[in-house]
Amino acid sequence: MTTENDRQVLNSILNPNLPIGEGLFDPEKENENLEKDQIPEMVLNLERLGRFAAEKGEIQESLAFFTKAIQEYPEVASCYNNRAQVYQLHNNSDLALADLEKAISLSGGTGKVAANAFCQRGMLYRKEGKDDAAMDDFRAAAALGSGFAKSKLVELNPYAAMCNAMLRNVFGALSEGKEPGRPHELAAKQND
């Protein structure tokens, strides 16, 4: 049995782009689209071993455990989601995207696994400069309750970015004891 702290550590390794506690692995909810008794214990153990190997930095072993779990029982969405994380560590975006597609498909686009997969895929799309596709994935993950996805939507919103920049300038000026400029002056400064 893992503790909450153990799950936070594993999650931060397997999902480094998510804030601590966001998308946290919960053995009771991770594969919520399958009945727990439908998943063979051997597959759950392989998935756990894959996480532990990743925690220790044993990436090849982690990949082997997730792949074996998928071969034994290919209907477990979280195995694809976790293996996608390992592929990302190897800078193999194509294989990561394929696994994320499978995770989203198997999860029916609902639940914690889907939210994590949408976030991961959104980050890959951002890396590739596909901001519209990234926004779509972050919207889907946000609708599933992901705080990380909500923060990324704000970050990608040009109006929110402009407002945040102006607020930073105002607070910066105030902290330096200066009079903050008018909004049009702040916008002009931002464009310089």
Image (cartoon, rainbow, N blue to C red):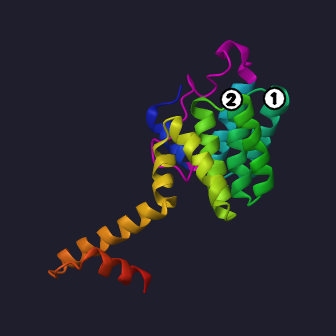
Residue that mark 1 sits on = 74
In this orientation, which residue lies closer to the viewer: 66 or 94?
A: 94
Q: Residues within 10 Å of mark 1 (few under 14, many from 20)?
A: some
For the C terminus, the quadrant is bottom left
Q: Earlier in the sequence, mark 2 or mark 1?
A: 1
In this orientation, which residue lies closer to the viewer: 9 or 192?
A: 192
Q: Position of residue 121 (x, y in %)?
A: 67, 49
Reply yes or no: does residue 81 show up in magenta: no
Q: Is residue 47 visible?
A: yes
Which residue type carries mark 2? Ser
Q: Judge depth for marks 2 and 1 and give the one in front.
A: 2
Residue that mark 2 sits on = 107
Magenta: main secondary structure = loop
The span shown in magenta is 13-42
Name the quadrant containing residue 174.
bottom left
Residue reaching furthest bottom?
192
Which residue is painted at 45% across and 33% down in the image? 4
Q: Position of residue 140 (x, y in %)?
A: 58, 40
Q: What number is the disc on residue 49?
A: none
CB-based contact (under 8 Å), mark 2 and mark 1: no
Q: 1 above or below 9?
A: above
Q: Position of residue 159 (x, y in %)?
A: 43, 63
Which residue is painted at 68% across and 36% down in the image? 49
Which residue is painted at 74% across and 58% down in the image? 90
Which residue type carries mark 1? Pro
46 to the left or right of 134: right
